[in-house]
Structure formats: C-alpha cells, structure tokens
Amino acid sequence: MYINEQYTMYKLAYHFITKLEYDVLYVSEQEHEIWLEQHEGSKSTVIRFTTKGFDWKNHLKKDIALVFQKVKAMKKLLQAKTINIHNIYISEHTPVDDWEVLKKPMQLNEKKPTMMNVYYLSKRNSESSYDDEMDRITKAIEMDLPAIELEDTSLDEQEKEEQLSYYKTYVKQRVVNFKEQAQAVFSFGKPRFTYILLVICISLFLWMEVSGGSDNTNTLIEFGAKYNPAMIEDGQWWRIISSMFLHIGFLHLAMNMIAVYYLGALVERIFGSWRFLVIYFLAGIGGGIASFAFSPSIAAGASGALFGLFGALLFFGLHNRRIFFQTMGTNVLILIGINVVFGLVVPQIDNGAHLGGLVAGFIASAIVHLPKHRERFKQLAACIVYIILIFSIIQYGFSNNLNDQVYHVMQMERLIGQEDYHTVVSQGDQALNSEGDLDAAILFHRSYAYIQLNQPQEAIEDLEKSIELDTSLPQAFHNLAILYDSRGDRNKAEAIIKKGYQKHPDDPDIKSLYEQIIGNAPN
C-alpha cells in the first residue's frame, strides 16, 4: 500500500532531521520526494528520498541522471568541494530487469566531484533484501537508523496515518520555519544610519567642491583627509575618521555612495542600526590605519568601511551558511575577489585600506555579533584581537613611513609651506637614506630650503645632482640657471637654461627665463 511507502520515507526523514541534524532542502508538492542536506567542512551529504517506483532499469537510470542534474544546479546552494548523494528509493516494486548494477557507486568527474550511491528499499527485491539495503544506508552514513518495516504490522491503519500526518507536518514546518527565519534575518533593522551617512558624505563633497575642489590637495588636507605627516608629526589621528566621509571627485563619490546604499542597507537590516554603526566605524578605522601603514599618499573615502560591510556579510555567512548562499553568498565572494584583484592591478587604488577594512569589519562583526546571539568569551576575544591588531599596524606604520621617501617628500613640502627651512634640510638628509626612487625630488626640495637659507653653493650642488638623476622637473633647471647667473657664471646659466628648454619647451617659466638670460626668444 502507498501509505506504507510514505510512512517509511517520512519516518526516515524525521529521524535524519531530529537525530542527525540534517536540513530540509525541498519537499515536493505531491509529497513523494524529500531532499535533506548536512554540511561538514568541505563535504556536503545529500539525502534524497522518493516513493516513485520503476518497472524497468532504463527508467530508473533516467531518474538517477535527473538527480545528478538537480544536484549540479544546486551546487551554488551547497557550496562544498565534495558532494555525496544517497539516493533512496522506497517502493513495493523493483524494476523487473537486471538493475542491480546501478547500485555501484557513481561519480561525476568535475572540479567539485559529485558521488552517488543508490538504494532501493523494497520487500519484493529478490536479490537484496530490505534489511540489507537498510544496512547499506546505515554503513554509508555511519549513523544508526531506526528499525522501520515497510509493512509495519505493529500499527493499525489509523495509527499509521496519524503518525504519518505528524511526520509530514513536522518536515513541512521545517521548510516554513526556514523561510520565516530568512525573512526575519533581513528585517531585523531599518537602514536609518545608512541614509544619514549618505547625506553626510554628499554634503561634505558639495562643501569641498565650493571650497576649492574635492580633488585639490590643500582642500582635502584642510577638510581632514588622511595625511600621514600631520598624523605622525602633529598627532592628528582624528583624520582616520574624518577621511571616511570625504571623496576625491564625483566618480569616487558616486561609486562609494551606491555601494553604501545597497551594502549599508543590507547590513543594517541584518545586524540592526547600532551594530551596523559600530561595524562601519570600526571597519573604517581599521581600513584607515591600514592605509596609514601601507600607503603614505593622501587618501580619503568610505572604501575601508565599505569593505568592512563585506566582512560583516562574510561573518553572517559563517553563521547562516544556507541563507547566505541561497541569497547573496556567491555574488558577495565574487565582488570581494574582483575588488581585491582590481586593487592589486591598479596602483592608484588603496588596497591596504580595502583589505584592512575587510578584516576589521569581520572582527567588528564578531565583537557585536548577530542579533539575539551572545558568545561573551568570543566577543571579548574579538575585541582584544582588534585592539592588538590596530596598535600593531600603527607601530608598523610609523616604521614603514619613516623609511619611505614618499612620506619624507610630503613632509618636506609641508615644512616648506610652514617656512621651516632648517628642518627641511635635516628631513632631506634623512630622506636620502630611506627607501625609494625619489632622490631627485628630495634634492630639489632641499635646494629650495638652501636658497631660502642663503646657502647658494649647497643649493647648486643639490640641483645639479637632481637634474643628473631626473630631467622631468622644469623648476630644477629654472632655479639652477638663476643661481648660476646670480654668481656671474653666464656660460653655465646659458647652457642649463638651453637644456631646460629642450626638455620642457612648453613651460612658461623656462621660456621667460630663457629670454632673460639668452637675450632673445627661443626658436
């Protein structure tokens, strides 16, 4: 009777769910098919039950091929390196021809191997008894199964129907519960702070545009961009936070604000507003500190915080793997991969801020954890890890910056703006002993300080070395020609301005000085 087959299938499914902690993937509307899954590490075990029977081997073979196709389509959901399928048929009838060969293990040879074992539970199987098949299943899953008879005579029909009804209700409710859980996960909070952040970033961008331009270096520094010399020399560490709200150019703003709108709203709905805000700021701080440590250039933008939101989604996926991969998991991983590779390929992108924000966002998520989750010890441990990591990167940042010529050139420019020429000279001495290929720029800046300190001979020596190393600085030719001319060395002045004009014929200062020294306009 068909009720016996359904009773066996649902009782087995109930046991796998309650005792072996399998998740319900699918229950057919006709109630003749159930799919379960258990994920451990890189392995996914799929149990497929069906009460469909087959008269011929070829019909059974076609169904097995269909199961392989379904699992292949489900790989995005399963996300395991290896997938083991236990395909269990429960029917009073077996195929009439020689079908036993289909019980041999099968495998699809792909990047992620998919293996299948077929079982046929039937009392009318002449070659392999029902009990033998149950033993095969028990050994394959390495777990004990309940003693279930296909034709259980210990229960009358009414009792069996009542139990079957209970099992059906339980299994179906698991599907409903999962849908409700997924819906609840994405509606815990409302994206209030996301919209506030958007308003702040856009407002500051417009303010910068009318105050000198968002791509103007002085404007960026004035508004609080990440500027390593000010942080190291003057302790302006608040720039790590202020730089999170500044953007350089409309394209930079547009890309980041679109990302904030979608990512921010999603993370705020999952974690709630206050958790989201903590994650955003801790990730932004982590990204900013990483940028300070690994990139001496001026920087601004919400990229570190945005990558922190990616880290928050990864943390969510770690604790809600099934919901994560059913909804957004693969897309999130692809986006992270593309951005990281893009950052490595394009030098202008601050990959340190991106990776720092990603890691900091993940750790920040562990600190606040998901709503209705409390793991005090792990949260405290995550907090300690975050603090240690931040201070370790800051220490590394000091060392890395002070050994980087880019930092020293920026600091020399800053000191020249402050008219602290004696310090410019000492800074130049230190810079020439640091790593980098900016000796020409350093010598040029130091020569300017020597000029202001009325030390022309030292300035001439630095400019000669600078031009010897790099002819791309027109001001070096200009200043050197003036110094030669001022000490009466007319021949050298004419030679250097002619060379400067050859290298930089379009520079207006070079043209003007050429006319003064040579006496006529260049040809």
Image (cartoon, rainbow, N blue to C red):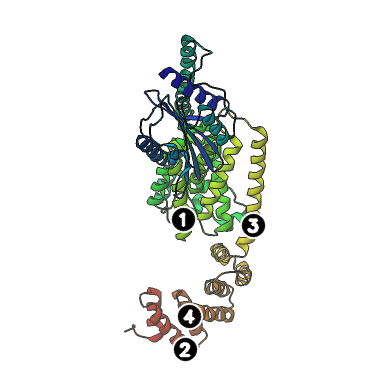
Q: Amino acid at mark 4?
A: Ile
Q: Nearer the viewer, residue 372 or 89?
A: 89
How far is disc 2 from disc 1 in space, using C-alphas? 55 Å
Q: Which mark is residue 490?
A: 2
The residue sitting at the front extreme is 126
Q: Is residue 426 above or below residue 395?
A: below
Q: Which mark is residue 396?
A: 3
| Residue plotted at (50% across, 27% down) | 130
Q: Amino acid at mark 3?
A: Tyr
x and y, in percent, of residue 26 in the image? 43, 29
Mark in the foreground, 4 or 1: 1
x and y, in percent, of residue 92 in the image? 42, 24
Judge the density around disc 4: few (<14), some (14-19), many (≥20) Cα neighbours within 10 Å: many
x and y, in percent, of residue 226 in the image? 53, 53
Mark 2 touches mark 4? (CB < 8 Å): no
| Residue plotted at (56% across, 69% down) | 436
Mark in the foreground, 2 or 1: 1
Q: Which mark is residue 482?
A: 4
Q: Secondary structure at mark 4?
A: helix
Q: Secondary structure at mark 3?
A: helix
- Badge 1 is on which residue? 341
Nearer-N-terminus badge (4/1): 1
Q: Is residue 109 above or below residue 463?
A: above
